[in-house]
Image (cartoon, helix red, strand yellow):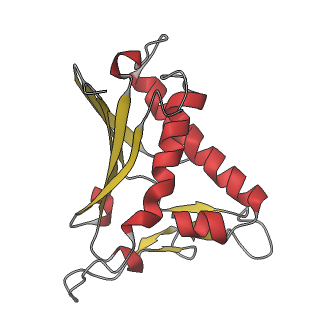
Amino acid sequence: MNFQTTSSISREPDEIIFTIHKFPTHVRTRKPSSKKGGAQIKVNGQTLYSGLHYAVRNKVVGSLRKSITDELIKHFPGGENLHHLVPMAITMEWHVTPNWETVKWSNKHNTLQCKDLEDRHYNGMFDTDNQWFWLKVFTDAISKDSQLVPEDKAPIIPNNGSIKHFPVEHIDDRKLVFKLKKINDV
């Protein structure tokens, strides 16, 4: 499972903003050559932790962590770390279309498909909290995988978990924005 994401970074003395553009919406759980075809599942916390066999879940989460870690390493080469932000708070912005619940993977066309925004009015009938796993994957990527912070325990990251939804006009404008901010009032 290799994802074609890009990333960008913004640095301030007490904050780093890491953005993953065109984050993966679906992941393949079977090889395309299998009898059932290359099954794709929509990536969200509910699917990953209640709907998948643990071995498939571990493979999917491991692939997502590797993808994020590979992007992080591009921005933090040569042993650079984030120790100057410790203790830190991590928040996430989730930028997706208002018709997110209609986004599906088409094996036939090998592409994302969703209902047209112009044809209907959508109110965002999906749960923002089902995206909690992205914070978990990101936190593991900055601590366990890339070792940008020594660990992900409470003394290092005492505030982790705020997710904000921002609507975007097109599925290709989707992104995840992780904000790592030094906590100065410990």
Q: Position of residue 3 (x, y in %)?
A: 52, 48
Q: Residue at x 70, y 51 (%)?
A: 59
Q: Residue at x 68, y 63 (%)?
A: 29
Q: Residue at x 34, y 48 (%)?
A: 92
Question: Looking at the image, which residue sits at the far front?
Answer: 186
Q: Residue at x 40, y 20 (%)?
A: 82
Q: Position of residue 175 (x, y in %)?
A: 33, 52
Above-or-below relation of 78 to 150:
above
Q: Can residue 166 be seen in this snapshot?
A: yes
Count of numbered tags: 0
Q: Can residue 43 be seen in this snapshot?
A: no
Question: Looking at the image, which residue sits at the far top?
Answer: 78
**Quadrant position of the C terminus in the picture:** top left
**Is 34 on the left or on the right of 107, as rendered?**
right
Q: Position of residue 32 (x, y in %)?
A: 70, 65
Above-or-below relation of 53 to 3:
below
Question: Looking at the image, which residue sits at the far bottom?
Answer: 120
Quarter of the image for residue 144 reads: top right
Is 156 or 177 nearer to us in this picture? 156
Above-or-below relation of 155 to 49:
above
Quarter of the image for residue 13 reads: top left
Quarter of the image for residue 185 reads: top left
**Is 12 on the left or on the right of 128, as rendered?**
left
Q: Position of residue 39 (x, y in %)?
A: 66, 70
**Is 28 on the left or on the right of 96, as rendered?**
right
